[in-house]
Each structure stands twice: as structure tokens, then as C-alpha cells.
Image (tube, grey):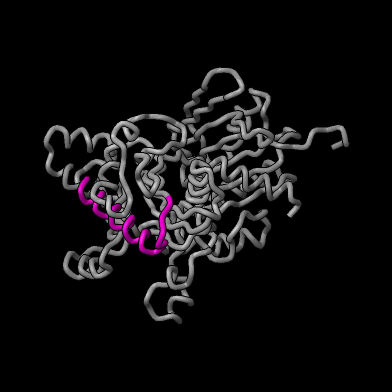
């Protein structure tokens, strides 16, 4: 590259799942999205790629067999090239990868080396559903652009600041340390972004603000953020702990597992499937779509109403717990699919917490918008906000800053 060439400013963000790849191409000169897309059902005859160029042109959908992640990323590269945004572009500065589990070693975005890959692989036993897919995505991207910095941004990184008294389980220390058993937390990229954006919404620096962030999607988690630093979060060793989720149970007496083994004769794998895929809202009422649950409630469905009440009860308990952890709260921020779109959830979660300074304005809460906004009345001591999350922008921002710093 000559001195007259523009500095590369584009970042491709990859989120690789076991049978899918979500991607976004962003230009960090102005944080503009250039293209977004999804490849799903990788390895099946009915694979599907949906690509949306945001610089002009129509959305394109391709169907047919895509054998593996290598084929998926090659197809993505071809679609980007059709829009003049190919992976061979000299304007590409880095590829940023979402990596679910980084353990305690990775507390910041990290340029991926073989040593880093070895540590991600060592963490597979504590993230068996996620890290293998992340590894596959990284290896594939490296094969396509071996000359380009590949940056890992870890879901757990934001939560590494938790003090030991919040991160430790009360079990034998030697056993816990030998098997890396502790609370790591997840959705950290979202919690970092939303806590910072909430401070901006209040017109303050993140270091001046205490925020309870409620990331409510099919997976759900809460965090207590003091002055921009996470001090507690609801997910633990795995994403199973904490709030009631779409298909996950959240908090559970661990003796339930022993009971199911002894009395129901269930295997470890069967219990794992029950708690991760057949519990939460879907286990309680058969639906994990909050819109459908609310529709059923409006029609008088008692099972759906009970599921909603259990969901809200757990959510309210965490708001109260994190209020106690922080001591002083400046804002409660709702984010992710349910948090951003389900006004009844926000209203119910805050209802009855007026003595804590929390309230929701009905008219403001009913407004649908993609913009960060306050939904609390002016008199409320604690701001209640809806702050759309943007994990892809956060990953791109962190990756680009790392590459530009030369680290």
C-alpha cells in the first residue's frame, strides 16, 4: 500500500454458529453498514443464504446445498464481490469474530494467533455448543485471508471485572479451580455497548453512571454495571443460569438434576436437553415467542399467563438484587428482541418498584422506535430506558480500534 492509499477502514464481522454464519460488513470511518447477511442450515440440502447490500441493490436469496463453513464463507465472499465489497478488497482492515467463551484469560479483544486458538479450544468443555463453531469460522476466514488480522471479541470479556465474591460458586475451591468452575457471564458485548449508550442517553460519562442492563431475547441475561464496569451478571459457568429464557430454565435447584437421574431415570444428555431446549417459556406454555404468549394471554390462556408471570417474577428479582449490589442506580436499560419490543414486559417488570424510584410512562413505553429512548416519567428518580443493542457494531469497533493501535 502506498502513502497515497486510503487507510483500510472496513471490518467484516462474523458470528459462526454450528450450522449458520451471520455477517455484517461495516466501514468504521463513519460506522456505516455496507452489507448484512445470513447463511443457515449449513450442511443440508436446503441451505439458504440471504444477502442484503446496503450501498444500493436488492436483497438476494440463494437456496441449495452448502456443504460446510468454508463453502458458506466462499459464498458470502462471492455475494460481497458482486457489490464491489469482496474479501480481497484492500479496504478491509480486519475480520472480527464473535467468540462466546474466553474464560479468564481474555478480558479484551485479541488478535488471533495459534496460542489464542489453543486457549479457545481448551475452553470447549465449558462451551461445547458455541466455541467449536466459533473455531470453525475463524479457521475458515483465516484460509480465505491469511494476510488479514483476525480479531476475537469474547462474550465473556466484559464480565471478567466481576469481583471474586460475585464470580465464585460456594463449592470446594480446589475442585472449582481444577475444572474452571466459576461464573463467567455471557452477552458481554451487548452489555458493554448498552451500558455505554445508556450513559450517553443520560448525557453522562459511563464512569459516572450505575446501570442495570436487561438483555432480553430468546437468551436473556442481566448485569449490574458500576461506572462502566461489570460487577455482577446473571449467567454463570454456562448461559443456562439466571433469568427465565425462551427455552432455558435459568436458576434451578441443582438437586433437581439428581432427582431426575434417580427418580425419572433420565441420562445426563436428556437432562441437558430438557434444561437448555425444553424449559423456560417453551417448557411452561409451549411458546417462546413473547408476541404469541401475549396474544394467548389476551384470549384468556391461563398457561400462557402463568409463564409470563414466572418470567416477570424472576426478572423483577434480579432488578432488586442488582439494585442492592449497586447501592445506587441511575438507570435500568432494556435491550434485545423482547426488551426492545415488548412494552408489556417492560411495564410489568417495573410495576410495584416505585419505592425504588422506578416507573414507566404508559405513552412513552408504547412508542415503537429504533432509537435509544427514555420511557420513565420526568419525576422518576431512576431512568428507565430502551436501548437497542448493536453487537456487530461493538465487535467492529473493538476490532478496528485494536488493529489501528497496532497491538
* Residue appearing at x 13%, y 38% in the figure: 301
Q: Nearer the viewer, residue 227 or 369?
A: 227
Quadrant where the C terminus sits is bottom right
Side of 355 where 26 appears, left or right: right
Residues drawn in magenta: 308-330
Measured from the top left, where is residue 323 in percent x and y?
A: 36, 59
Q: Which residue extends farthest top?
A: 57
* Residue appearing at x 44%, y 54% in the figure: 129
Is 164 part of what is drawn in magenta? no
Kindly indicate the quadrant of the structure image that contains residue 336: top left
Kindly indicate the quadrant of the structure image that contains residue 334: top left
Q: Nearer the viewer, residue 305 or 115?
A: 305
Q: Nearer the viewer, residue 136 or 368?
A: 368
Q: Nearer the viewer, residue 79 or 220?
A: 220
Measured from the top left, where is residue 57 in percent x and y?
A: 58, 17
Query: Is 170 placed above or below 61 here?
Result: below
Side of 6 where 278 appears, left or right: left
Measured from the top left, where is residue 187 in percent x and y?
A: 46, 51
Q: Which residue extends farthest front?
A: 379
Query: Is 311 placed above or below 76 here?
Result: below
Measured from the top left, where is residue 125 in percent x and y?
A: 47, 64
Tag count: 0
Q: Which residue extends farthest right?
A: 3
**From this viewpoint, is residue 122 visible?**
yes
* Residue appearing at x 52%, y 59% in the figure: 229
Kindly indicate the quadrant of the structure image that contains residue 294: top left
**From this viewpoint, is residue 43 visible?**
no
Quadrant where the N terminus sits is top right
* Residue appearing at x 83%, y 33% in the figure: 5
Amino acid at each position: 500500500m502506498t502513502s497515497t492509499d486510503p487507510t483500510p477502514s472496513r471490518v467484516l464481522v462474523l458470528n459462526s454458529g454450528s450450522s449458520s454464519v451471520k455477517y455484517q460488513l461495516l466501514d468504521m470511518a463513519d460506522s456505516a453498514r455496507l452489507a448484512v447477511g445470513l447463511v443457515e442450515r449449513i450442511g443440508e440440502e436446503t441451505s439458504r443464504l440471504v444477502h442484503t447490500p446496503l450501498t444500493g441493490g436488492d436483497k438476494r436469496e440463494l437456496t441449495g446445498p452448502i456443504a460446510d463453513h468454508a463453502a458458506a464463507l466462499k459464498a458470502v465472499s462471492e455475494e460481497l464481490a458482486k457489490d464491489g465489497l469482496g474479501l480481497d478488497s484492500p479496504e478491509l482492515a480486519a475480520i472480527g469474530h464473535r467468540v462466546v467463551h474466553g474464560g479468564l484469560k481474555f478480558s479484551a479483544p485479541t488478535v488471533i494467533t495459534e496460542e489464542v486458538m489453543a486457549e479457545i479450544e481448551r475452553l470447549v468443555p465449558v462451551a461445547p455448543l458455541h466455541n467449536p463453531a466459533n473455531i470453525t469460522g475463524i479457521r475458515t476466514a483465516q484460509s480465505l485471508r491469511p494476510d488479514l488480522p483476525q480479531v476475537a471479541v469474547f462474550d465473556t470479556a466484559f464480565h471478567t471485572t466481576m469481583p471474586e465474591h460475585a464470580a465464585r460458586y460456594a463449592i470446594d475451591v480446589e475442585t472449582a479451580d481444577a475444572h474452571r468452575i466459576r461464573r463467567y457471564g455471557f452477552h458481554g458485548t451487548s452489555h458493554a455497548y448498552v451500558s455505554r449508550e445508556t450513559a450517553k442517553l443520560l448525557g453522562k460519562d459511563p464512569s459516572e453512571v450505575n446501570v442495570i442492563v436487561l438483555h432480553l431475547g430468546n437468551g436473556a441475561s442481566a448485569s449490574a454495571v458500576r461506572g462502566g464496569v461489570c460487577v455482577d451478571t446473571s449467567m454463570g459457568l454456562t448461559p443456562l443460569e439466571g433469568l427465565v429464557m425462551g427455552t432455558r430454565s435459568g436458576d434451578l435447584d441443582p438437586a433437581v438434576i439428581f432427582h431426575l437421574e434417580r427418580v425419572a431415570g433420565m441420562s445426563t444428555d436428556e437432562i441437558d436437553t430438557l434444561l437448555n431446549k425444553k424449559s423456560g417459556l417453551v417448557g411452561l406454555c409451549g411458546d417462546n415467542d413473547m408476541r404469541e404468549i401475549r396474544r394467548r394471554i389476551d384470549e384468556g390462556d391461563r398457561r400462557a399467563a402463568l409463564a409470563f408471570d414466572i418470567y416477570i417474577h424472576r426478572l423483577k428479582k434480579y432488578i432488586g438484587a442488582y439494585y442492592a449490589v449497586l447501592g445506587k442506580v441511575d438507570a435500568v436499560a432494556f435491550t434485545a428482541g423482547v426488551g426492545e419490543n415488548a412494552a408489556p414486559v417492560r411495564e410489568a417488570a417495573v410495576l410495584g418498584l416505585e419505592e425504588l424510584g422506578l416507573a414507566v410512562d404508559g405513552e412513552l413505553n408504547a412508542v415503537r422506535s429504533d432509537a435509544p429512548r427514555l420511557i420513565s416519567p420526568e419525576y422518576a428518580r431512576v431512568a428507565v430506558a430502551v436501548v437497542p443493542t448493536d453487537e456487530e457494531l461493538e465487535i467492529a469497533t473493538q476490532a478496528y480500534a485494536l488493529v489501528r493501535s497496532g497491538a
